[in-house]
Amino acid sequence: MRVTGECACGGKCKKVFVFACSGGSDVGELADRAARRLDRDGVAQMYCLAGIGGDVSGIVKTTEAADAVLVIDGCSVNCGKKTSNGRASSD
């Protein structure tokens, strides 16, 4: 799935956001690197997790309009999931 352009099937591509809880630990850094790789490879667009937690209206509205959202947590504390408060989830 590509974020920009047309999909291989000729259809419109989905808007996919990825958020990473980068944390202060080594595993947080790995989560951040994974999200950046997805962005660089065109699989998803990395977006601002702090903006979701801070309830920044533009970021929240843009995220709610996404076709799919992925949150990558670096550890089992799940700060990214908790920060997203259910906003960064989709069916």
Image: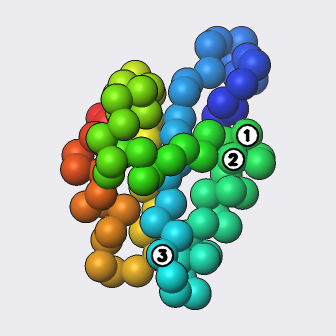
Q: CA distance from mark 2 to mark 1?
A: 5 Å
**Residue holding disc 3:** 23
At label 2, the amino acid type is Asp
Residue density around tag 3, few if under 14, some if 14–19, many if 20 or more, within 10 Å: some
Between disc 3 and disc 1, the foreground one is 3
Q: Is residue 74 above or below residue 39?
A: below
Q: Nearer the viewer, residue 70 or 91?
A: 70
**Looking at the image, which residue is at 32% across and 51% down?**
53
Contact between marks 2 and 3 (CB within 8 A): the answer is: no
**Residue holding disc 1:** 42
Image quadrant occupied by the C terminus: top left
Q: Evaluate whether residue 28 shows in this view.
A: yes
**Where residue 70 sits in the image (x, y, percent)?**
45, 49
Q: Nearer the viewer, residue 52 or 36?
A: 52
Res 13 → quadrant:
top right
**Residue holding disc 2:** 39
Residue density around tag 2, few if under 14, some if 14–19, many if 20 or more, within 10 Å: some
Contact between marks 2 and 1 (CB within 8 A): the answer is: yes
Q: CA distance from mark 3 to mark 1?
A: 24 Å
